Amino acid sequence: MRFMLSALMILVLLLTATLIVMGQSAPGDIVFSRKDGGGGTPPAVFPHWFHRIRFKCYVCHDAIFQMKQGANKVTMDAIMKGEYCGRCHNGDIAWSVAFETCNRCHVQR
Ligand code: HEC
Ligand code: HEC
Ligand code: HEC
């Protein structure tokens, strides 16, 4: 009986873990949450790992982003003004924000 219970517990834990991973785009990606529909544009996905291996943590934390998911009020206006993602995605350090690049960040999942 006790064995059955712990086996069940492990199964539940594994399922939860799988669901959490499946809810993300890929492991290590941060999907921005947005309340309004944003005119059909899917929420932006930030490949954290991709950036982490290229930059030291302090390049972004807390100079550009607070180290907490959802803590940064990132908007397209701010990005276009060169804040947040726009600090680098300006055609200088990384490819810029343009109509050809919308779907690199706004990934339909
Ligand atoms: C470098 C990444 C990046 C690119 C490129 C980009 N966006 Fe965004 N965008 C974001 C992030 C991050 C947010 C904030 C999180 C969210 O709402 O998805 C955002 C927010 C938005 C929003 C929500 C409302 C607002 O104004 O904040 C819309 C709509 C939007 N983007 C449209 C676009 C369109 C259209 C393009 C192409 C011209 C584009 N984005 C290109 C990263 C990007
Ligand atoms: C290119 C910029 C960038 C770099 C470099 C970077 N991060 Fe982040 N990090 C972000 C962004 C963007 C978020 C999400 C913020 C949000 O959702 O508002 C984030 C979120 C986080 C979070 C919060 C995750 C959560 O679930 O709340 C932690 C922890 C974190 N980063 C740690 C690190 C560490 C450790 C490093 C260095 C190894 C690092 N970051 C490098 C941009 C970066
Ligand atoms: C510190 C600089 C920096 C910041 C801030 C930054 N990026 Fe990037 N990002 C880069 C660089 C550099 C690349 C690689 C560019 C290249 O390959 O030409 C990149 C690539 C990407 C890619 C493509 C990844 C791939 O698999 O090819 C996406 C998507 C992306 N960034 C989204 C974002 C979003 C969304 C934000 C804001 C939440 C953001 N970035 C903020 C520097 C940055």
Image (cartoon, helix red, strand yellow):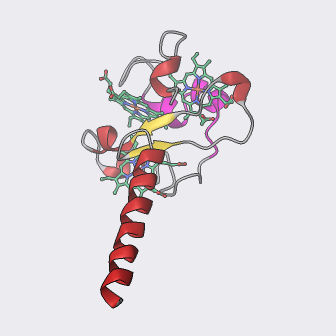
Point out the residue furthest to the left here: 53
Q: Quadrant of residue 38?
A: top right
Residue at point 37% right, 23% down?
94
Q: Is residue 83 left or right of residue 35?
A: left
Marks counted in the figure total: 0
Residue at point 39% right, 76% down?
9
Magenta residue check for 79: yes
Q: Is residue 79 above or below residue 90?
A: below
Image spot of residue 96 (x, y percent): 45, 18
Magenta residue check for 90: no
- Which residue occupies the foreground of this view, 80 or 32? 32
Image spot of residue 40 (x, y percent): 68, 23
Q: Is residue 88 left or right of residue 52?
A: right
Q: Considering the image in quadrants, where does the N terminus appear?
A: bottom left
Residue at point 31% right, 44% down?
49
Q: Quadrant of residue 48?
A: top left
- Which residue occupies the foreground of this view, 54 or 1? 1
Image spot of residue 39 (x, y percent): 73, 23
Q: Is residue 104 above or below residue 32?
A: above
Q: Is residue 99 above or below residue 90?
A: above
Point out the residue furthest to the front here: 1
Image spot of residue 13 (x, y percent): 39, 68
Q: Give the extent of the magenta segment.
A: 73-88
Point out the residue furthest to the bottom here: 2
Q: Is residue 3 left or right of residue 45?
A: left
Residue at point 49% right, 9% down?
100
